[in-house]
Image (cartoon, rainbow, N blue to C red):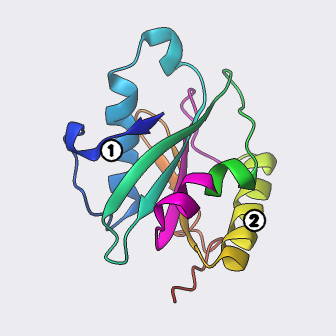
Amino acid sequence: MLVEIENLQSPAMITNPEAVAEICRAILSVEEKHDQEKEHLWVFGLTTSNRIKYVDLVTLGTLTNSLAHPREIFRMAVMQGVAAIILAHNHPGDNPKPSKEDIKLTQAIHSAGEVLGIPLMDHVIVTWDDYWSANSEGLVTPKVA
């Protein structure tokens, strides 16, 4: 599902992981309660000036996980010709700490982005009250062309 940014009452430019978290919360807040309790995995496609070109819901999982693969994550990025992506997903519980699978996914997407020339700028994990950022933790070091 592609979200049109104009319908979100959030900034169109990403300057920090908190902005990503706010947009994810805004998207979740308009969903049915039973869907809010599922993991969502979004890809933010960015222009060269870090403006959001799109937000794509790549997968809607269960309470504790969702399936993701680089081909689905980069599909829209390649079609839309974005400069970079941000990966974001929610943890329906209160803990934004990444699982081992979250770290593996971050590393895989970072590597795939280097091959494609579409860098992964961050992977943000969101809860209703907190967030975690791979970039802030030094796990993602994007190389922008």
Residue occupying the far front of the picture: 79
Q: Amino acid at mark 2?
A: Gln
Identify the residue shown where x is 40% and y is 28%: 28
- Of 100 and 142, the residue lying toward us: 142
Q: Is residue 133 visible?
A: no
- In the image, residue 13 sits, relative to residue 143, either above or below, namely above
User: Is residue 124 one of those drawn in magenta?
Assistant: no
Residue at 50% x, 70% y is 84
Q: What's the CA distance linking mark 1 and mark 2? A: 24 Å
- The x and y percentages for residue 139 are 66, 71
Q: Earlier in the sequence, mark 1 or mark 2?
A: 1
Tell me where the magenta segment starts and ends, as one range: 75-97
Between residue 94 and residue 11, name the one nearer to us: 11
Q: Quadrant of residue 32?
A: top left
The residue singled out by tag 1 in the image is 22
The residue beneath circle 2 is 107
Question: In the shown orientation, is residue 139 left or right of residue 50?
Answer: right
Q: Look at 31% across and 68% down and name the residue there.
A: 15
Residue 52 position within the rendered picture, expressed as x and y whole percent measured from the top left: 34, 59
Q: Position of residue 61 (x, y in %)?
A: 67, 26
Q: Residues within 10 Å of mark 1 (few under 14, many from 20)?
A: some
Q: Is residue 88 magenta?
A: yes
The residue type indicated by label 1 comes to Glu
24 in relation to 145, above or below:
above
